[in-house]
Amino acid sequence: MMTYQHLLIHDNGYIRRITVAREAKLNALSKATLTELNNAIGDALATAAIRGIVLTGAGDKAFVAGADIAEFAGLNSEEGRALAQDGQTRVFNLIHHANKPIVAAINGYALGGGLELALACHIRVAVTHAKLGLPEVSLGLIPGYGGTQRLTQLVGRGRALEMILTGDMVTAEQALEYGILNHVVESTELLAKAEGILHRMTARSQTAVAGAIRAVNASLGSNDQGFETEINEFGRCFGTSDFSEGVAAFLEKRKPNF
């Protein structure tokens, strides 16, 4: 098995747990972390002995607190667009279309790219103290890793627009009520719950499970245009003064002045 700098890999029978392990950075998704996720998920999907995947974060503060914003600074609109396209193709769509079930075990904050990572998974379980949100508008950005599409599919247009346009966080209980989460549990039960769901799935016909995932995904229709629009709009944000101000304010730990 490959060794990773930013991930921990643990097998439990048919289930592989992939943990984003950048606790000091609240498990933020750097380019290097996304590359490792692409490799680790691809490897798990290609390993016959693995029938399901749990995706989680290290520590009890954050699942993934977002993208590594410092890496965004200085990108122009074409580079911004490429960033979204690359992440979507290599990680978020890879998860969404995986032929083995992937459960997000949300152990704390799931914000921005972190929530988008969870949204790409097939099922989401969170701890009671988890907070979820898409705060990109406070950076002069929009979600760029599928958030505008996948959140809307789960919660409907009204709820999705409220979360995306305010950038506000919701509690685990609210997220459960909205339909973002399948289950909310105490911290001590999180991994057992996520793995328990997968154990029931891994006991079923694997060809049927893969077929069911494809069929359910097909029910969402061909919304390639939606993802393409998101990627283009995300890229366009990078050319704006609002983006420059939003990122500067974030890095300087002050409120942006839009």
Image (cartoon, grey):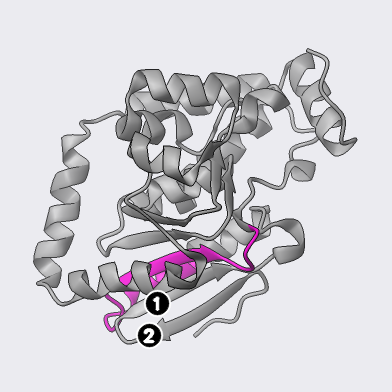
Q: Residues within 10 Å of mark 2 (few under 14, many from 20)?
A: few
Check if residue 65 falls in the magenta segment. Answer: no
Q: Residues within 10 Å of mark 1 (few under 14, many from 20)?
A: many
Q: Is residue 170 left or right of residue 200?
A: right
Q: In the structure shown, which secondary structural element does the residue marked by tag 1 occupy?
A: strand
Question: Can you give x and y, in whole percent of width and height, for residue 73 in the image?
Answer: 80, 35
Disc number for residue 12 = 2
Check if residue 48 falls in the magenta segment. Answer: yes
Q: In the structure shown, which secondary structural element does the residue marked by tag 2 occupy?
A: strand
Q: Quadrant of residue 155?
A: top left
Residue furthest to the right in view is: 252
Task: Residue 45: tell me if it is visible.
Answer: no
Q: Amino acid at mark 1?
A: Arg
Q: Amino acid at mark 2?
A: Asn
Question: Can you give x and y, in whole percent of width and height, for residue 95 in the image?
Answer: 38, 54
Task: Tell me which segment is drawn in magenta.
Answer: 39-61
Q: Nearer the viewer, residue 6 or 163?
A: 163
Quadrant occupied by the C terminus: top right
Above or below for 98 versus 134: below
Q: Are marks 1 and 2 in contact (CB under 8 Å)?
A: yes
Question: Can you give x and y, in whole percent of width and height, for residue 208 in the image?
Answer: 9, 64
Q: Nearer the viewer, residue 99 or 119?
A: 119
Q: Is residue 90 left or right of residue 183?
A: right
Q: Is residue 153 left or right of residue 6?
A: left
Question: Can you give x and y, in whole percent of width and height, for residue 116 in the image?
Answer: 49, 43
The residue under the point 74% across, 16% down is: 240
Count of marks, rendered view:
2
Structural distance between the alpha carbons of marks 1 and 2 = 6 Å
The residue under the point 36% across, 20% down is: 157
Task: Residue 249: tell me if it is visible.
Answer: yes
Disc number for residue 16 = 1
